[in-house]
């Protein structure tokens, strides 16, 4: 079914996010006769990794690469399925009701409530915060944002662009720039020296990973995008009103390079806001240095009726996410009583094997690209919360005033209470408090996130069907 | 395990528990505050921060007025201004019934000798609240009222109490309370505490302490919803509350707008979780747009609910237990206990240390529910 104009009041299954996991889950669940709705904020299916795969102006396949175009098969299968696909739809709240959930969904400026017996949350990954001095200057953006411009509009970087950071996605973006004929002035690689050797020692399984060949080819192609400076130990964006140059240190020596645009990236982390707000338990994953929702092999979360799928349940990459989507659909079918556990396990054998194949050697990537502490935990006047302009020192001071965790600190400093709702500072704050208290992020915990998980206008909120406030339901003032 | 000892054990690290601990220290008594989560975790830390004498139950007015005087000098008490600002609170009349109700109230308060609530006609109302919709017909104002930052306030009381030598045990759950000699033994998840006096400041969980000593109390846990917008240009200084409709509305110093007013979330008291009711919040949003046209494009960034204790008559329980000696209750503030925190801490500290108080707390006796049961 192509995009739906009107939504029903109720579905058996609602899926949030139309990336590889969400698309695969919707296709698999609807094939089993489950009435399924798939909500996604974008105008076309694909998520971040396959963004605009049905609409991109870049039709020369070699620019975005075969791995990108694989997403087209997922999108085509989704659009051919009986799932109701609802693009440009923001699910900003979910509440537990009897026999399921009630979702608040905004489409075209109006909100409505949709009920579903089961939820698959496939909210994917987001770029890890990269809080260096000057990271909020105009002209500094994430490499992922630059990639969105490339995919959706064919925009490539102009002269004076410097790229800094680490991680597979950084090299993918560079390779795509190179294929599109663009170059960058410099690549400041922050991967610590000796990491690959150490990771190889601890995670030799990578030798059998499908990503090994892909990765080597990617590194080769990425190098074509510009001069690479390895072993960068510190970074600072400098400029008056906007970024003008980058100061960096290599081997103890400081250098500067002029630039008009600085693209930062140091890996991706699960986008946990929805899962967190609905109450799913999560834990600190030290290898990936981020919070990850706690799930079993089928994506079952700690909240009854909620299955998590894809990178939102732990970073594993697009192909593992796709298999995870199929697995999540089977888990939902089981939870909805369509199949029993044995049938689920049997039907999921192939998808589980596929997922395992793509997970092979994951540990190598985690170890090789784990960002160094100095790029995760800032100090001094470096901003932690860009919405409310809270510095690292202010967070440290609030700990000394007795804040033992991110939620108290939020009340103290408004850190994390701005429009990004903690997406840009959550991990930084937990790690900073942990460091200051000589504790661990696991012990310190993450922000308790609240609905709406994305800002919503008062007008949209008012457009929801209203409860007739009963005398009983309201605490009233005396006469 | 050796028991911790103090003159007084206080169950609950909300504003009231911390205030009582602080006032006890000033009176020379040692106290341990036992808090199951962290200080200010529930209603004390996340309420709307209203410092309101306006629209109080008549029994609460003397306490509220005395507390307001403390608020105006709060820094002298806790070494922190608590973010307190006094721009008044206004209760608006939207129709003839509201006008009649407010006029009748003002007359009744005048007869009782109170002058803190004053009627204002539309010209003064719109001068004070230019953004208010023009269908409003006037209102009652309490000019010395205001608002403070709830978490900062609660933390300031806690820090001052600790600075004066009191102890606060966070992440510590009370498992059992029992008489021990002349005093109390409190078994907690962090070990036993021996204290001469027990103070029950356990908020939405206070009835559980009562149940342990055989003093049932009709407490209803409630979770009241709030929402806050992104920053907006300044358009409002006083706090505005509704008369016929549930609303509490204020713009903070940084420009965000706080919307509350007594609408309830669904609540799981044992899990200590709340589920927002978006149908209720939608009704709230629609009302806000009617009263403040400037809010049409406002962006709601966050909704939440604080867990709180409500009594059937909407006034708190303050005073000695009717069943056990050396036990004092201080709970059930029914969604308007924040303003009372400074003074009730003083009153309870006075009860603990001297056995009496000059404050008029008879209406808040826990006995009143017994009497009701006997009549019923």
Image (cartoon, coloured by chain):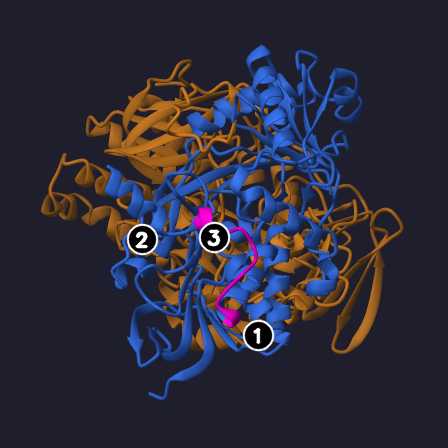
Q: Quadrant of residue A179?
A: top right
Of all chains, the one bearing label 1 is: A
Q: Nearer the viewer, residue A161 or A477?
A: A477
**Subunit that carries the residue with mark 3:** B
In the rendered structure, find residue B318 and report the number of the disc placed on it: none
Q: Nearer the viewer, mark 2 or mark 1?
A: 2
- Can you identify the residue that label 2 sits on? B270
Residue with the mark numbered 1 = A437
Q: Distance of mark 3 from mark 1, alpha carbons?
A: 23 Å
Q: Is residue B362 magenta?
A: yes
Q: Is residue A178 left or right of residue B276?
A: right
| Nearer-the-camera pick, B351 or B162 | B351
- Residue B119 placement, left or right of A312: right
Farthest bottom residue in view: B2
Upstream in sequence: badge 2 or badge 3: 3
Q: Does dot 3 land on a helix, a strand or a loop?
A: loop
Confirm whether the magenta stretch covers residue B182.
Answer: no
**Disc 1, SS:** loop
Report which quarter residue B20 is drawn in. bottom right
Q: Residue at x 68, y 64 (%)?
A: B78
- Residue A415 seen: yes
Disc 1 residue crowd, few under 14, some 14–19, many 20+, Cα 10 Å: some
Q: Would residue A447 appear left or right of A246 to someone viewing this image?
A: left
Q: For the residues tagged 3 and 1, is the chain the same?
A: no
Q: Are the residues tagged 2 and 3 within 8 Å (C-beta)?
A: no
**Distance in Å between CA atoms under marks 2 and 1:** 29 Å
Do callouts 2 and 1 mark residues in contact (Cβ within 8 Å)? no
Label 3 sits on residue: B42
Bounds of the magenta segment: B353-364
Identify by letter the chain in orange.
A
């Amino acid at each position: 079914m192509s995009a739906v104009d009107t939504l029903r009041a109720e579905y058996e299954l609602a899926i949030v996010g139309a990336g590889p996991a969400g698309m695969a889950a919707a296709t698999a669940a609807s094939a089993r006769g489950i009435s399924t709705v798939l909500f996604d904020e974008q105008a076309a299916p694909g998520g971040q990794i396959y963004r605009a795969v049905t609409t991109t102006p870049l039709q020369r396949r070699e620019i975005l690469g075969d791995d990108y175009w694989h997403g087209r098969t997922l999108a085509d299968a989704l659009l051919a399925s009986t799932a109701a696909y609802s693009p440009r739809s923001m699910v900003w709240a979910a509440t537990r009701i009897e026999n399921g959930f009630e979702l608040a969904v905004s489409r075209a400026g109006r909100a409505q409530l949709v009920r579903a017996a089961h939820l698959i949350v496939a909210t994917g990954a987001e770029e890890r915060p990269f809080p260096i001095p000057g990271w909020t200057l105009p002209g500094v953006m994430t490499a992922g944002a630059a990639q969105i411009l490339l995919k959706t509009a064919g925009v490539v970087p102009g002269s004076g662009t410097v790229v800094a950071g680490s991680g597979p996605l950084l090299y993918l973006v560079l390779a795509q720039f190179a294929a599109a004929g663009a170059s960058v002035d410099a690549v400041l690689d922050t991967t610590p020296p000796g990491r690959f050797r150490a990771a190889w020692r601890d995670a030799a399984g990578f030798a059998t990973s499908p990503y090994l060949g892909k990765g080597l080819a990617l590194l080769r192609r990425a190098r074509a995008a510009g001069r690479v400076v390895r072993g960068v130990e510190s970074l600072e964006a400098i400029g008056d009103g906007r970024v003008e140059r980058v100061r960096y240190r290599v081997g103890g020596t400081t250098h500067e390079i002029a630039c008009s645009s600085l693209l930062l990236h140091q890996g991706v982390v699960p986008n946990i806001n929805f899962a967190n707000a609905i109450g799913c338990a999560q834990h600190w994953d030290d290898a990936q240095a981020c919070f990850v929702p706690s799930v079993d092999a089928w994506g079952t979360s700690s909240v009854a009726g909620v299955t998590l799928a894809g990178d939102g349940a732990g970073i594993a990459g697009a192909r593992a996410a796709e298999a995870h989507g199929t697995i999540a659909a089977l888990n939902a079918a089981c939870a909805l009583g369509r199949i029993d556990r044995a049938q689920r396990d049997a039907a999921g054998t192939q998808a589980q094997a596929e997922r395992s194949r793509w997970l092979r050697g994951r540990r190598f990537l985690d170890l090789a690209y784990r960002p160094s502490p100095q790029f995760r935990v800032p100090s001094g006047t470096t901003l932690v919360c860009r919405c409310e302009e809270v510095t690292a020192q202010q967070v440290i001071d609030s700990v000394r005033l007795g804040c033992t965790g991110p939620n108290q600190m939020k009340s103290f400093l408004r850190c994390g209470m701005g429009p990004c709702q903690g997406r840009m500072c959550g991990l930084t704050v937990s790690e900073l408090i942990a460091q200051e208290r000589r504790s661990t992020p696991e012990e310190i915990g993450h922000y308790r996130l609240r609905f709406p998980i994305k800002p919503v206008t008062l007008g949209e909120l008012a457009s929801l069907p209203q409860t007739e406030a009963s005398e009983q339901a309201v605490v009233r003032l005396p006469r | 395990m050796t028991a911790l000892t103090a003159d007084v054990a206080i169950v609950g690290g909300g504003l009231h528990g911390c205030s009582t601990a602080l006032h006890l220290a000033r009176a020379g008594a040692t106290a341990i505050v036992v808090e199951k989560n962290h200080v200010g975790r529930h209603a004390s830390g996340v309420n709307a921060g209203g410092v309101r004498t306006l629209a109080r139950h008549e029994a609460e007015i003397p306490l509220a007025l005395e507390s307001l005087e403390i608020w105006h000098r709060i820094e002298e008490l806790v070494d922190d201004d608590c973010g307190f600002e006094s721009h008044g609170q206004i209760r608006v009349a939207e129709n003839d019934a509201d006008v009649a109700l407010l006029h009748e109230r003002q007359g009744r308060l005048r007869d009782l000798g109170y002058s803190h609530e004053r009627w204002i006609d539309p010209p003064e109302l719109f001068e004070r609240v230019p953004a208010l919709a023009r269908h409003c017909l006037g209102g009652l104002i309490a000019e010395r009222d205001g608002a403070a930052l709830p978490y900062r306030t609660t933390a300031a009381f806690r820090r001052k109490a600790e600075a004066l030598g009191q102890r606060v045990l966070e992440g510590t759950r009370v498992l059992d309370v029992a008489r021990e000699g002349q005093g109390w033994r409190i078994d907690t998840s962090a070990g036993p505490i021996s204290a001469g006096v027990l103070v029950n400041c356990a908020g939405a969980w206070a009835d559980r302490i009562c149940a342990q000593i055989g003093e049932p109390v009709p407490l209803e846990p409630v979770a009241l919803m709030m929402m806050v917008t992104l920053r907006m240009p300044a358009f409002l200084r006083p706090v505005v509350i509704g008369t016929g409709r549930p609303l509490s509305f204020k713009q903070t110093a940084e420009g965000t707008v706080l919307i509350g007013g007594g609408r309830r979330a669904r609540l799981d008291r044992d899990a200590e979780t709340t589920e927002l009711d978006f149908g209720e919040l939608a009704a709230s949003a629609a009302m806000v747009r009617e009263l403040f046209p400037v809010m049409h494009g406002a962006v709601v960034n966050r909704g939440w609910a604080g867990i709180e204790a409500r009594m059937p008559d909407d006034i708190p329980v303050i005073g000695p237990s009717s069943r056990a000696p050396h036990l004092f209750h201080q709970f059930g503030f029914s969604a308007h206990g924040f303003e009372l925190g400074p003074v009730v801490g003083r009153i309870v500290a006075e009860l603990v240390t001297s056995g009496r108080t000059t404050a008029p707390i008879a209406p808040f006796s826990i006995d009143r529910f017994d009497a009701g049961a006997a009549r019923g």
